[in-house]
Amino acid sequence: MPPTALDPQTADALAGVPLVDISATGPGGTPVQQAMALMREHGSVFVRRLHGRDALFVGDPDLVAELADERRFAKHIGPGLENVREFAADGLFTAYNDEPNWTKAHDILMPAFALGSMRTYHPVMLKVARRLIDAWDRDARAGRPVSVPDDMTRMTLDTIGLAGFDYDFGSFERPEPHPFVESMVRCLEWSMKRLARVPGRDYSAADAAFRDDAAHLAQVVDDVIAARTGTDQSAAEDLLGLMLSAAHPADGTTLDAANIRNQVITFLIAGHETTSGAMSFALYYLAKHPTALELVRREVDDLWGDRADPEPAYDEIGRLTYTRQVLNEALRLWPTAAVFSRQAREDTLLGGRIPLRAGQAARVRPGTRALFLHGSNYGTCREFAASLADEAAAVGCESEVAPLDAYAGGLPTDRPVVITAASYNGRPTDDAAAFTARLEDPQDLTDVSYAVLGVGDRNWAATYQQVPTRIDDRLAELGATRLLQRAAADASGDLTGAVRDFTARLRTALLERHGDPDAAAPAEETTAGYEVRALTGGPLDAAAERHGLVPMTVTEAYDLTAPGHPRRKRFVRLALPEGVTYRTADHLTVLPANAPELVERFAAALGADLDTVLDIRAARPRRDGLAIDRPLTVRRLLTHHVELLERPSAAQLATLAAADPCPPERIALAGLTDDPRTLVEVIEDFPALRGALDWPTLLDLLTPLRPRHYSISSSPAVDPGHADLMISLLHAPARSGKGMHRGTGSGYLTDVRPGDTVYARIQPCRDVFRIETGAPVVMVAAGTGLAPFRGAVADRAAALAAGTELAPALCYFGCDAPDADFLHADELYAAESAGAVSLRPAFSTAGTFVQHRIAAEADDVWELLGAGARVYVCGDGARMAPGVREAFRTLYRDRTPGADDAAAERWLDALIADGRYVEDVYAA
């Protein structure tokens, strides 16, 4: 047992970082307080030297947040935990990252910490809490003081013993701590004191005493395990029962007896060092703050004050919101796990200035595979899935990307399955329908390991994340094991940040579960004197290839609205390249460009020269990174490659705060939450940022420019070589109150002229939104939501001219006024005159919206519904679509005797489920 402190690991001198040698005094009995005092004296970053061993201490919040980035840093088993390993071995807290038992125990024990398991432990927690109260009542009656920290230790040890292992320490029935607890405390003290040993001194007596204590710990736990081994543990609800009976979801193996012992000891240490400490400090601070104590008492009285001997239910505990805040604040003021160790995954600079060497290479084991499935109508989830697959490939995984329906017959058990899925009006996307239907069938997915990334838009609150949530829940119900907790990415929030966070957690999970302990850092490659790249094609070809776009030429562009109309709408016609075809109601996916005046404004805020040439090369290929294959000017970068009008996320604001050299500005930036300003407005309002952001930081800060989707408004039956668009220019007062906001995509397409090149692709619409001519149809639209219906009316007119008999069709269309924005009025009236459609315009200047006209002509609509009509709604999803749904529910209630609101809701839901009421709507 060589003393850990004699294994010197002296670091190279770090420029600008103070080095404090405490070898003469040692860390003392309060090493955390000592480190805090050293930080107050030397700053928030310093190197502490103890008998030749150097350790970098970091207390700066920004640097700590950087160290918490799992993409760059990993858990480190430092000297203190190395000493704890002497009696906890490969328990969860002290196992090395690449130790097989860490992964096995982590996977097997995850269910024990789920919400349902907490509910199972609740009665035991109440039982022990009553023991504590009874003990304090006895002491109060006898006039004896109580030791709160000792009693918190008693309470946590009894709770963990009973809930975790069905073992009763009986701590409140003993005047002194249980012998197990005394041995455990002495083992922990030995671990900490061993760090401060002076070389050359004799510590054999202390080591012998430690060995006796460690042996006692092992013997007590082994006896508990032996009493349960060989018995049926299938009905056991505690941690020990799970460890004795549960098999690993991947290989079916179970934990060995030695590792079970190590886990039991680890959990008891954790309870002693964390929960008991947190409770002690919370009670201490409440005693020091009588106002807070009174608020806690009032919250408890509100729940149970009318009962002499309450029996708190599990669900009631969550209502103690102020008490929860007290615990959180106590942990903030004095965290019971005040220090943790990290190691760099690869050579890096902390805070851009402190060099840290890599701990070890991070790769998965050779042959590790992963499957990435997507449910996607417009390609977003498909692109995210491909990006996740790239990230997995970067750490050595063999990856496959496929739609969910490709695995409707069953999921593989030989590799992790990562699902990226969206909801479409609460229903699965077209390429996930068969998979989600099959998922409802009974089946055993015990050996499946999975993770779900849900993509949605919180503007649709009723159906937000509905399908990914159901997939995640149902897979768990069928026995599959979560590789990660489900992530919810919100298109109206920090979508990119949520995906990046999920990507980082997935990478970490893959490395932790499948890491290759024998992986070596890549050797330095010998290179020639020059590296030459031959550049072919155009400057946007890389971005076009990334998104599957092709160049299309604008042949016509003109206003559809009257001159001076405030809500301008534009017609754009594009010539399709040879071989590119489309069907009516398909979408066109377009890569926009930022307006020149916005680019100049952004560059001015940054203090950047637009003519500076940048040579940008990604450290490794990333689908979520910039698609740039050649040097380019700052002007071209800001015009064609990055989003400039996004509201900054919390992570982006933190990056700006870290870069701001002005302390008052830095504090103000750090305090921003839910700010209405765009990124350029924030940078303008904090002038110290001008020139403070280097290009690598900026490129990490800016989101790559995203393609936009538009409904095609033409029919290939009329002109198969061209696709038409209706563009509604977004030009409205900025949310920040500073001037006007002009949409990136709509502004770009409003400005194109004949002869311009647009990079775009055809994106098929959902099959359920294709309008056939043989069945009655009701089309409902507002503004440019008319686009797919213009194509459908053209289809009907062409079919009618060819002699086809048509079923009836109504087209409700909302606009402002007949002479202002009745889009394609002459063309539509001609189709109506030919008998292809019955137009039902609704003019808002007259106080009429489409839902009002539907209600006024309910008999016509009801008659078509009775004849099997399908209803199609396109356009504004925030106001128009909900109004139309309510109009249809009212229509049903008024014509169905005895029908109430619930019945009308069920009727509309049935139409939706049958594909007879279909929406293609967007957030306005």
Image (cartoon, rainbow, N blue to C red):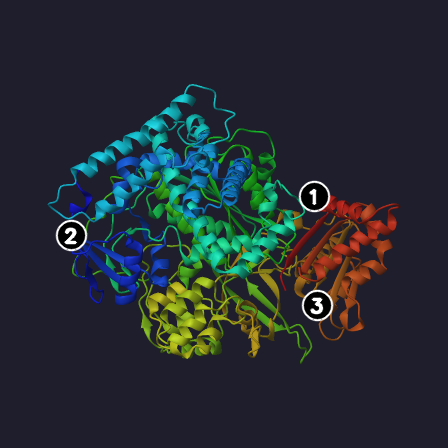
Residue 125 in the image, given as x and y percentages of width and height: 52, 38
Query: Is residue 428 in view?
Result: no
Real-space Cα distance between discs 2 and 3? 84 Å
Question: Which residue is at a point 60% across and 42% down the rendered structure image?
Answer: 312
Q: Which of the two discs, 2 and 3, sits closer to the camera?
A: 2
Query: Is residue 608 in view?
Result: yes
| Residue to which mark 3 is pinned | 824
Q: Give the mark nearest the N terminus, 2 or 3.
A: 2
Q: Is residue 783 left or right of residue 59?
A: right
Q: Which of the two discs, 1 and 3, sits closer to the camera?
A: 1
Q: Give the mark nearest the N terminus, 1 or 2.
A: 2
The type of residue carrying mark 2 is His
The type of residue carrying mark 3 is His
The type of residue carrying mark 1 is Ala
Q: Are marks 2 and 3 in contact (CB under 8 Å)?
A: no
Real-space Cα distance between discs 1 and 2? 72 Å
Q: Is residue 64 left or right of residue 855?
A: left
| Residue to which mark 1 is pinned | 913
Q: Which of the two discs, 1 and 2, sits closer to the camera?
A: 2
Callout 2 environment at 10 Å: few (<14), some (14 to 19), or many (20+)? many
Q: Residue furthest left?
A: 200
Query: What number is the disc on residue 51?
Result: 2
